[in-house]
Amino acid sequence: MEELSGFYKLSAEERLKKIKKIANLTDDEAQIISDTGALKLELADRMVENVIGAIHLPLGIATNFVINGKEFLIPMALEEPSVIAAACKAAKQTLPQGFKADADSPVMIGQIQVVDIPDIGRAKKELEQKRSEIMKLAEKCLEPHAKWGIKPLGFNVRELSDMLLVEFDVNVSDAMGANMVNSTLEGVAPAIEEYTGGKVRLRILTNLAVKRKARATAVWKKEVVGEDVIAGVLDGYKLAKSDIYRCATHNKGIMNGIDAVMLATGNDWRAVEAGAHAFAAMNGYKPLTHYEKNKNGDLVGTIEMPLVSATVGGAVNTSPTAKITLKISGVKSSAELAMAAVCVGLANNFAALAALSTVGIQKGHMKLHAKNIAVLVGAKTPEEIDAVANELDKLNDFSSENAKKILDRLRVA
Ligand code: NAD
């Protein structure tokens, strides 16, 4: 603790030097941590606190996505093998129609908590009487952003035991909206205190963005995927509906894809995660997707969930890669990004259910994971990594002992 006093005041290089000493890092290890790539160290140091370097994730592109008749290249950043391949495969199986998707207007809800109110009934009446003054104040707070169509839409007052919640709806246009909404709440809070006679405590948006949902639907034809896959997906879906243990993993599979799109585009994926699971739990934890057969016996998959995404603001503005990944994606608004993300989530969910209910996922997964095992045991060049991974797959033995033996053998040969 003493050695780290004033840690935050040091430069990133000095911090890494200290950590290197304390954690006994080798020169190579410290070098890896300090290699920030496109994200320059000075910029990383301004984005978050106590920076010593950066970590890197692979960035891939999900292909075959046709959404509302338009082709998209969807960037995905994550460390887990198979997810991108699964999204591409499931999307291909929807062609030529692809996905139909839509998104609500970008409305975020911000909450002000008021406690210690002397007379709740009177406070509610007062807030009603002062509605237009309160709205004018909120509009003033958002005035700097009005040119983008950002504005407060109204507020509701909710009684919760001995507290009041004053909840504002704000149209945040193409931003995620957290900072703008939170600043507005802090801006109107003194007036809320005055009118209610109570004390304002929390002033923050909710990540359960029920007014900013995105939806997608796709049809997997029986001639394309086969009747057994359709039956398997329906059985898997039935299990997720009836068992929370399965449902958690069902929804995790959806978020594999959605988080990866959010991360690749500089979005706040924790916010999307929080919203997804809270929404899934609103009436007892349920799957975020729905499956049924249409009259032809084809499988219709749908997804609906809050999807708060941004094409401006937050890290989208500061990350050197976010602007580029958004350019690759071709999305023109936060709503379009939300639609692309839910389509990926649906595709990943279908692919996971199709594989899990038939051949299982381990064969494909382990084949891709074999490369990680090769690196783990010390394979360095791409040729070495591929050779070890291929041999592991051929022998169907993915243990690190086996990988080490293969690598040693390769190096001797
Ligand atoms: P922000 O503060 O960067 O605001 C967006 C900016 O973009 C504004 O200045 C706005 O005027 C400008 N802009 C330009 N063109 C626009 C357009 N077409 N549409 C909308 N705005 C446009 O970002 P934000 O969206 O208010 O806040 C997002 C950040 O807040 C994220 O980094 C997030 O991680 C963080 N955050 C999240 C939470 C939470 O989820 N609970 C809480 C606090 C902060």
Image (cartoon, rainbow, N blue to C red):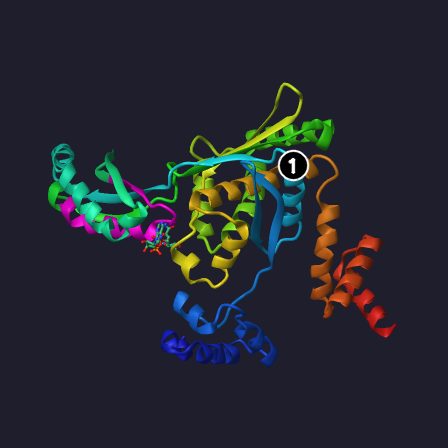
Q: Looking at the rendering, which quadrant does residue 371 occupy? A: bottom right
Taking the magenta stretch, the answer to whether it contains residue 191 is yes
Q: Is residue 289 visible?
A: no
Front-lying residue, 374 or 295: 295
Front-lying residue, 223 or 278: 223
Q: Is residue 390 visible?
A: yes
Say whether residue 378 is left or right of residue 22: right
Q: Amino acid at mark 1?
A: Leu
- Quadrant of the frame with the C terminus: bottom right
* Residue 263 in picture, x, y percent from top left: 51, 54
Residue at 32 percent across and 46 percent down: it is: 205
Q: Looking at the rendering, which quadrant does residue 370 occupy? A: bottom right
Front-lying residue, 102 or 358: 102
How crowded is the residue under tag 1: few (<14 C-alpha within 10 Å), some, or many (20+)?
many
Say whether residue 324 is left or right of residue 227: left
Residue at 39 percent across and 37 percent down: it is: 210
- Quadrant of the frame with the N terminus: bottom left
Residue at 82 percent across and 66 percent down: it is: 405
Say whether residue 396 is left or right of residue 271: right
The answer to whether residue 145 is above or below residue 171 is below
Q: Specify the segment rendered in magenta.
A: 166-193
* Residue 332 in picture, x, y percent from top left: 46, 47
Taking the magenta stretch, the answer to whether it contains residue 30 is no
* Residue 347 in picture, x, y percent from top left: 60, 39
The residue carrying mark 1 is 353
* Residue 199 in picture, x, y percent from top left: 17, 47
Residue lying farthest to the top in this orientation: 295
Q: Is mark 1 within 8 Å of ligand 1?
A: no
The answer to whether residue 320 is above or below residue 169 is below
